[in-house]
Amino acid sequence: MTDPVDAVADLPPLRTVIAENDLAARKSLGQNFLLDLNLTAKIARSAGDLSTGTVVEIGPGPGGLTRGLLGQGAERVVAVERDARCHVALAPLVTAAAGRLTLIDGDALDVDVTELGPAPIRIVANLPYNIATPLLIGWLKQADRIASMTLMFQKEVADRIVAAPGEKAFSRLSVLCNWRCDTRMVMTLPPQAFTPPPKVSSAVVSLIPKTPAPTACSMASLERVTQAAFGQRRKMLRGALKSITTDPEGLLSSVGIAATKRAEELTVSEFEALAKAME
């Protein structure tokens, strides 16, 4: 019997798979295919031990990262794909994986990734750029049921995820991600690594949910406060927070934050304190 890992390695090159299945990337689906199997293997390795639980991949396309995950010993990969062309193109990979790969037909925004297989759940994906941020926010809300996320974004979004207070990229997304997870930039990839090349660089970010989960405030409250603060980030907080409280200066004073500060100057802990005070 052929070893499943060998069977995956013996599959045709990805460019052949794309050509034979007329699998041109579609902008409407946010598709940019990563075809360098050395890079996909490197991303899979950065996700750690995949030999237990379930690895969830979003938008596998022709299967470059999927091959990397299987090659790194993933016991169970569940790939969510809405493009019917990709299901046809991935059929030989499903066969070669010998039970380790399951394809789900659906929109990732409508799929509960925590229900796709046994824990621990690890999400590893080259995310469709047009839905990457909404997907991430949704997963942060389920982070108590997710072991890790190793995700590729546009570089600009990745910079915002890992940014620290005071940095130009520090944003609402920075606060939400670093309140709930430990974040780390894993690698940056140039446009030419993809087919077709996007107009911007991309980057892989590691997000490990904190254990135990922070409990000082709810994520809903933190979302509300950060939306107000960063929605008018050029304003001092005493002005920016008027949309959520009739007494912004009193709210800020109650947690020891100067009313003249701006959103990018606050720490994640200070945003947490504001959210708690709002509750």
Image (tube, rainbow, N blue to C red):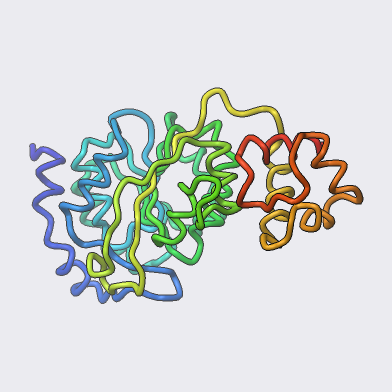
Image-quadrant location for residue 148: top left
In the foreground, 205 or 168: 168
- In the rendered image, residue 83, in percent from the top left (x then y), is placed at 40, 66
Judged left or right of residue 160, residue 218 is: right
In the foreground, 227 or 250: 250
Judged left or right of residue 17, residue 125 is: right
- Image vertical order of residue 261 relative to residue 216, above or below: below
Judged left or right of residue 222, residue 2 is: left
Quadrant in the picture for the N terminus: top left
Residue drawn 58% across the image and 37% down it: 179
Q: Which residue is situated farthest in the right direction here? A: 246
Residue 48 can be seen in this image: yes
In the foreground, 51 or 128: 128
How many badges with numbers are in the image? 0
Quadrant in the picture for the C terminus: top right
- In the rendered image, residue 135, in percent from the top left (x then y), is placed at 53, 53
Residue 275 can be seen in this image: no
- In the rendered image, residue 53, in percent from the top left (x then y), is placed at 37, 30
Judged left or right of residue 125, residue 231 is: right
Residue drawn 36% across the image and 46% down it: 185
- In the rendered image, residue 68, in percent from the top left (x then y), is placed at 22, 47
Residue drawn 33% across the image and 57% down it: 60
Image-quadrant location for residue 171: bottom right
